[in-house]
Structure formats: C-alpha cells, structure tokens
Amino acid sequence: MKKLFKILGITLGSLVALVLVVAAVAVWCVFTPDKLTPVVRQVSDKFISCEHEVGEVDLTFFSTFPEFALRINGLYLINPMEGAQSDTLLAAPKVVARVNPVEFLKNNNLIVRELSLPDVQANIFINPDGQTNFDVFVTSPDTTAEDTAAFSLPFDSLSVEGISLTSPCLSFVDKKDSINALLLNTDLSGSVDGWDDVMLRLKSESVSATLGQTQYADNVQLQLSVPAEVYLDSMHFVLHDAELAVNQFELGLDGTVDLNPSFRTDLSLRTNDWEIEPLLQLLPSSFTDGIKDLRLKGDFQLSAAAQLNMQSRQSHVHIDQLEANVWNSAVKAQGDIDDLLGKMWLDLSLNLDVPLKDVARWIPQNMSVNGAVNGTASAQIFLDDLTAMHLEKGKIAGDLCLADIDFRMDSLMAAFDKTRLQFSIPNAQPSRKALGWLAATLQMSELTFRQTGTVSADLDPGTLQIESGNILSSDPVIYAKVGLRSSGKLHAEMDSMAAVMQAPDLNAYAEFDTKDASKIPVLVANMTFDDLQGNYTDIAAHLRKSALKASIVGGRRDKSVPLLSAQISTTALDASMGDSLTAKTANFSLSAKARYNSKADKLLLKWNPKLDVELKHGEVKVPALPPLIEIPQIKFAYSNRDFVIDTSRVLLGNSDFCLSGEIKNIGKWIQQKDTLLGVLNFTSARTDVNEFMEWFSADKGSEETADSVSSASAEATSVEDAQPFLVPTDVNLTLNTHIDETIIFNQVARNLGGQIYIQNGRLVLEEVGFVCRAAKLQLTAMYRTPRRNHLYLGFDYHMLDVNIQELVNMIPGLTTMVPMLDAFRGNAEFHLAAETYLKANYEPKRSTLRGACSIFGKDLVVMDNETFSKISKLLMFKKKTENLVDSISAEMTLYKNEINVYPFCVSIDNYMAALGGRHNLDMSFDYHINLLKPVYLGVDVSGTFDNLDIKLAPCRYAQDFRPLFHNKVNTQSAELRTLIRESMRKNVKIQ
Amino acid sequence: MKKFSYLLVLCTLVLLGANSCTPKDEVASPQPDRLLIGTWQENATRHFVRFLSADEDPMVGEYRFGYEWDEDDDVHPEDLIWHGNGWFKWKVETDTVSHKSVIRLTEIQLMDNGGAELPDTYIITTLNSTTFEYAPEDNLKFTHCFTKAD
C-alpha cells in the first residue's frame, strides 16, 4: 500500500511537472500543438523510461488564465514485464489538467484546478521479486537507491480542486504478496486542499479482489467517500465521516488509520441494516465455513468502535449497539470484543427474544427444546467456546422469562408453562464438585418431567432450584441437585414407585446414566410435606405431616443392585406390603435400609431390610394371624440377622402382652439354613393359649417327610381331621413369661410364670406355675412331635390345695389315667410324673402310658353312695357315718392300661384298712382291702363300680402294716426335671 | 414188720416228695431265658414284645433288655427311643414255692426321660419254642398269651 501511494504520488508529481514543462514551453513558443507536441514528447522522453506515446498536446493559457489548461490527446505507457496482465501500464486517451503556474513559480504551491483522465486503463503489476511495471519515471540516483526513504514532494503545498478519473478497467496484480484487484467501470473523483483536507470518491461497478487463496471481493459494487486528513510522511490518515458501501452494505467510519510501521486503526463505525444471508455470501468462505450450515437469515445493525493493531495483533471492538434479527429471534447486544484477529473474547450484554427452535442447532443432537425465551443475559466467553458450547469456560448468566417450554434429551422430557429463569454458568458456589456447571432458579407455574419408562414428575406452581453438571458434555451421567418448594402438589413416578406429595419442600441430589438403564440411579433426598401417598411394587404408604430422608444408590460391586435407606418421622402412617402386611399408626418414626436381591423369593430375603422403628397407636394385619394386631407402643430394630424388641405392647385377639427380647438368624431361618434363636420376655395381663396354638402350628412333624405326611393323612381314620400342634425343629426360642391370667383349654390360670422353651423340636415348660380354681400348680413338661400321629407328652406336675372335682374338669383324660379320682371329692395334694404318646387328636396311646403318682388327701369324700353302701353294710359302719376319709396317702404307678396302687391305709370311722390293688383304665379294678382295726380280715373287691364283686379273702397285709412310701414321685420328679434339661442338648439335624 | 412198715411209709414219703412240681403246663428245656429271647406277638393283637440277648444289648447287672410296641396304637419299633418308653429290663428266676417250681419274670419298664423304673413281676405259665404265657404274680387270673413271631 505504501509503495502504491508513493508511486501514485511520484506519478502525480511527474505529471504535474510535465504539465509545468509544457506550460513553460508554451510560454516561450507559439502555443500550437504542432509546436508543443514535439517538445512535450522530447521532455517525456527524458522523464519516462519506458516505451510511451504522447499524443497531440494542446495548451491553453489565456482563456484559462491565470491557469494553464493542457490537454494531451493520448498518453500511453507501455512497460512489458513477464507475467504481467498486460504490457500496457497506462492508456489514457485524454489527459486534461488546469494548473496555476504563477502560484507554483512564485510560491512553490501547486494548485491544480482540474485533472481529468477519462477512459483510462491501467494495469499495475508487481512481479514475485517485487519489481513493478510502474516504476518508469526517471528520478535522481539518490532517491532511486533509498527506496525506503521518507517521501517528500517538490513543492510546498498541493491543492487539487478536482480530480476525476473514469476507467473501464483498472487492474492491479501483485505476485509478490499474492494480491489481485480488478475494478471495472470505475469513477474516481477527489480533491486535495492541503493534506489535511483530502476528499476522495470512488465508485466502481465491479470490484474483485483476492489475497492469496482468499477471494475477498467478487464482482461487488463499491462506493467510497472518504473525507480525510492525509499525512504521507507518517502514513497517518484521519477519516472524517467516511462512507463505504459494498453492494447494499453501508458502513460509516470515523477515526484514524496508520500504515507506518504497521497497520493500525482506531475507528468508530456504524452500519445500516445489513441482511445476514447476502452478507455471508459476500464474505470469503474462510470466514463463513464455520457457520455455513446455519443458514442464517435476518439482519442486523451495528454501531461500534474498533481498535486494531496488526503489529501487536491487539484488537478491541466496543459495541454501542448491535441489533440483530436472526430467523425468528431478536437480539440486542452491547459490549466489547477483544482479540478480534484471534480467539475473539466476548463480553456482551444481551436482550433476547428467542424462540428456542432457533438455538436448536447449538445444542447436542440428542436434545431438543421448544418454547420461547426473552430477557437479559450476559456472556464473557471466547467465541470458539461459545460456538462449541463449552460454556463452562466462560461466564454466562441470565434472567429470562420462559414460555411454553418443552425440553427433551434422549429419554428425558421436561415441560413447563410460564417460568422465570435465573441462571449462571458456571455455578459459582456448587454444593458438590460435580455440580459446578450450572446454577439456576425457576419460578414456575407448572412443571412436567419425564424419563421414558422410568421417571415422571408433575409439579404445581413452585420454585425450583437446580445445580447440575455439564449436560452438554459427552459424559452420559447426569449430575443434578434439585431444590423444590411448592404450596401445591408434586406427583412423581420412578420405575414401579409412585408418590403424590402435598406442599413439598424437597432437596434432592441425583446421578443417573442416560445410556445404561441397568445402573441404579443415585438419589439422595430430604423432604418435608403435609401429605404423601406413595407405592412401590406391592408396598403402599400414606403419611401425613412428615419429614423424610431417603437415598437410593447402586451397590458398590454391582451397580444394578439397589441399596435403599430412609428415615421417616410422621404424625400418621398407613402402609401395606402386598398381602403380607398392613399397618396403621399415629406417631411413627422409622429408620430403614434395604438391599434388593431379585433372586430371592421371600419378601424379607428379597429386600433384606434393616429397620429401627418406634411407633405409637399402631395397628397391623398379617395373613398368618387372623385378628388385627393392635400396638399401643413399640420400639424395635429389625434385620434379617436379628430382631431386637426394646419395648412393645401388643393386643392380639383375646390376648395382650408386652414383649421384649431378641431373635436371631431370621434370614437364614427363612432360607432353612440355620436355627431361629431367641430369648423373649413375655408379660401379659391376659393370654389365650388356645388361640396361639391354633395360629402357630407347624405343617409337619419333626420326623416326618412330605410323603409320610401325605400318607399319614390318607391312612388316618378317626384322627384324619385332627391338626395337632407340631413343634418346629429349626427354632430355638426361650420365652420368660409372666401372665396374670391364662386361658388354656377350658380353665383360667392365674399368675402363670416360668420359662417356655422351643428347642430341637421340643416344647418345654420349665417350672411354670400358676393358680387356678383347681389348685396351685407347678408344671414342668415336655411336648415333642416326632410324627403327626405320634406326639410325646411328658410332665412333672405338682398340685397343692387341690379341688379334685375342679382338677378332673381341668384335665380331660386325667380320669383315664387315674380313674378312681372320679370317686373322690374334696381337697388333696397331688404329684404326678408321667409320659405318654398321643394320637393326632391328643388321645393317649395307652400302650405307651407310663407314670408314677402320689396323692395325699385329707377330709375327702369317697366314692358314691351306692358303692359305699355295699361296703358299709358289709363292715357294719354306724349309720350316721358319712363317707368321709380322715386321711389318705397313696402312691401309684401307671403302665399301659393298668394302675398299680401300692398298699395304703385308710381310716374311716373306727376302722383302719389297708388297701392295694390294680385299677384298669377300662374302670375295672381288683383291690384287696385288709381290715386292720377293729378286726383283722381281708376282702377282695373287684369288677366295676356297676358290677361289684366283694368277697372275703385271706389277709395279705400284716396287722401292723404300715405302707412303705417308696417316694417314687419325688425321685422321679427330680430325675425327670434333670433329664428333661439334658434331653435338650441332643442334636437334632434340621431337615 | 414194724421196720417194713416204717420203711414203706418212708419210701412213700420219699416218692411223694420226689414228685416234680412242674405245673401242668410245662416249661420245656433249655433254660427259660434262652427260650424267651426273640420276638413274640400277643394273640389276636398287633402287640409285639422282643426280648434281647446280652449279645444284642449288653446286660445291666442281672437284667437284659427288651422292648415292646403295639401297632394297633400306631406305635412301631422305629418310634421307640433306645432304652426309653417301650423298653424294659427283664430277668427270669426259677423259685420253688410250696414244692412247686415257679418261673418268675421281672420286668422294669423304662421311660423316655430316663431314671424312672416301674417294676412288675409275672409268673410264666408256658414257655416253649412257639408259645409264651404269663400272668401278673398278684393276679394270676389275667394271663397274656404270645406266639413266637420270629
């Protein structure tokens, strides 16, 4: 450029000098063309080094005084160079100039009134070596050698009032810098009034220019109007309201342009409305390649100030106002752009009115957004980062109004009506490291959220605060934190979970993999709400006024296995778990953890729950138990490993009890891999044992197989309908009891206490005592169930203060074992150690009856009147004698059908008798009564009470007979109790 | 003559005294405890009794062991617990009562929970390789009849 101006300046000066020469010659000669022309030619030969042709020269002076007017009819400069676009450097059919020689000669001021070159063709060429074809004027050796010397003109001032040049074709080719320029039909005019008042106008119908491989102009219309100050010595130009128009694009410029030592500008510019599409077509493809697929349509208008320094590569543009309408969007921008020639740093404030379809091309292909956005935004970011959507590398913020938003990404969908969105990227204060990309607050009317087949949520008006990780990155995992507050309802569903929440206040953090549906999403949530109704598979719950903390994460080793934890406190809860459980409670708090095992079939094994529960005023219904379980209070901790009851009070059927204790191995017991272990403490005001036995019976005997169960059922006749209680073999439970009132069979027992064991298939009551109408009792007993129809019962039974009638009523079948009891009335003391096997209907197998028994009675009423009458007649009792026995002390052994009564003494009236014999269970008997006082004689009494056979017999007992008390019962009792405990240590394998 | 008379009376007494007291129903040789060993079934029932030898179950003192079961009561040998309910200890003694030889069978019934023993004594009235009859010592009217089952 510098060289061009220099060359132009030299050319212009040379022309002017030539004019002066011509004028001088014209002064001293006759101003005829014939005279002038040869002279001019001679002079031009001296000044112009290349081939040239000067046409007729016509000089006027007096008509144009004080100015000369010179007309040259043809000026041609021909300077062939290899590679040049033409051998003709300049072809000017006419050159007209009017100058004031007097001013020049007198004051060295060059005043050119007119310089006109119509129809000029010029072909300027610079070869690859930098040699030019327009360096054709002869200059002094000094100026020629120093090409870089500062340019100076041979006059003090220059004033060119009118320059006009028209040209059909101006060509400039610079092989060295790969510049090509072609101007067709160009009209150039200007004026110079001192270098501080330069005016240049250029109009060209067709301008084409390339630089290197880039075509910067292709047949464009160019108009230029440049009022300027020109300082050629420093190559400093000042533009005043310059106007540039390329085709329809107008640009106004004000400012400075410097060319020395490098290109610098400080300009303010303003445009008219520029249409984007034709503008992009005008720009070189290298500028538009990045956005060629955008198919931008619209227009914009710009007012800005720009500073550019090509040497330091610094650039700055201040945008006063940029108004753009692109597609259907309207954007107004203000701000600054730095490093225009490099990465282009944007610091912009925007007013937006954007339908979101317009920005779809900048979002990932798996996302789509519909709706409209308007509001303000700001951005401080590099353009590359913006176009590549690396938003986190800058700062983006906005306060927008969203309307009719429909957002979709892969399987995600979110829609909301009118919403105010305030956001910032990045998140200045992330609550977690992964949430550093976005912080946003939405004040919305309604929200709908879906993840196809997995999650859905609908929210009434509320406020939503969001933090998220980079959703525009290639990472398939989405990190998000949501804070939600609404006075309305939230309805959410995920997989087979659903919940409706009233007035939620929620904070939740989530991670989920949009590509891998098998991974369990991470969800950590805290919430409070007025009301919640939820369900998960077959679990349903309804809570009121509650607080909840919950989390779902994938397992460490297997991400597809969900780990759940929850803490709930509520004022009221209704819950159900399939058909397994229903529950209802007032105040309730729960801490729960669960690990889902899809391979398990039982509910507890499937979920592996760990619970800490405290509730008041609860009700529970389970299928295994017919009645409703009422729980006034309970506090317990449960896992499949152990179940610890701190305190509980339960009302079940006719019973109430308080239960505490611990049960272990629940999970393994359900899997039939281990024994259920436990120690429980049971206290009750009232317990109905008959109900418990009915509920908790096992399905088969301890030594039965499934086949033997079915065959036994098929073969059974009288016992076929019986369903005896079968003791489970895989249970080892101890129950310490105290029951104020117990209902068992048809009796009511009071103050029952003791230990009850279930162990190794045996049910043992150890030293369980109680008081009932019949007596004061202490019982140690064992019940085991080898087979359904072969049940074992052994017991050690002590009764004090016995009412015999009540005793017989209390123990059905006792008269079967001790038939003669039915003949006594009154109070007695009774000790019994016995065992037998039972049928399924609890009928004794008489062949297995074994036992020992002792009775001590005082003031008993014996037998019935008819029987006693027979004996009294025989023994001649006094008539007034009642059938009263002063005392009786007897011991018996029981073997099968037979009770062997050891001889004992009876005292009635004046008589003392020894009595011994056998009493059969069919109520027949064979006794020997040996009268000791007042006479010594013997009687055999046999038969039945209905068919008595009494006859005298030899005495069997000595007159001083006193029975030996073998103390069998005491011995047996102690041994029985010891051996019962020892029998529990036997190992029974669980089958 | 007087001497001959005394001698005749003496011989008569000797003859009378030398007569066997074997009851009408004889207990045949060999020894009765050996004859008892085995399984017997009570006539017209499914009540079985098995007397074990010392080889089958070691003796305790002078007692051997045996067990019984009643299939009419749905009790079978596999239901019995060793030396428990259904088991008994037994011994056989031969006594002379009123010049008569009496075979006394003593059985001590055992219980599942051990320790308790219920003794009883019987008089064996018939015992051979196929038949076994006995009655309680204090009530000989009630006789139990068994037939050898193995």
Image (cartoon, coloured by chain):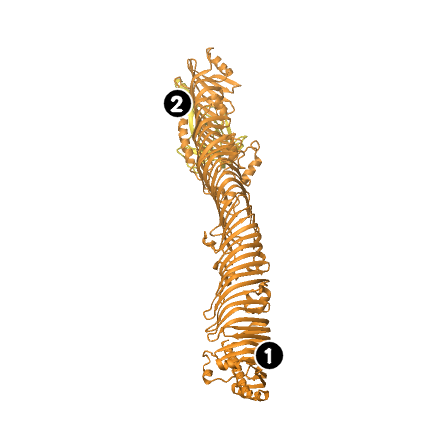
Nearer-N-terminus badge (2/1): 1
For the residue pair B111 and A419, the one nearer the viewer reads as A419
For discs 2 and 1, the disc positioned in front in the rendered view: 1
- Local packing at callout 2 (Cα closer than 10 Å; few below 14, some 14-19, many 20+) is few
Residue A659, percent from left and from top? 45, 34
- Three-letter amino acid code of the residue under disc 1: Pro
- Is residue B122 among the parts visible in the rendering? yes
Dot 1 falls on a residue whose secondary structure is loop
- Local packing at callout 1 (Cα closer than 10 Å; few below 14, some 14-19, many 20+) is some
Q: Is residue A50 left or right of residue B13?
A: right
Please, which chain is the residue tagged with disc 1 on? Answer: A
For the residue pair A213 and B92, the one nearer the viewer reads as A213
Residue B150, percent from left and from top? 51, 36
- Three-letter amino acid code of the residue under disc 2: Leu
Residue under label 1: A118
Residue A868, percent from left and from top? 49, 15
Please, which chain is the residue tagged with disc 2 on? Answer: A
For the residue pair A822 and A434, the one nearer the viewer reads as A434
Q: What whole-number distance in Å separates the C-alpha atoms at marks 2 and 1? A: 166 Å
How many marks the image carries: the answer is 2
Task: From the image, state the color of chain B.
Answer: yellow
- Residue A146, above or below A984: below
Chain in orange (letter): A
Residue A738, by quadrant, is top left
Dot 2 falls on a residue whose secondary structure is loop
Residue A835, percent from left and from top? 46, 30
Kindly identify which numbered label has been placed on residue A374.
none
- Residue A142, above or below A469: below
User: Is disc 2 in the same subunit as disc 1?
Assistant: yes
Q: Are marks 2 and 1 in contact (CB under 8 Å)?
A: no
- Is residue B23 among the parts visible in the rendering? no
Residue under label 2: A964
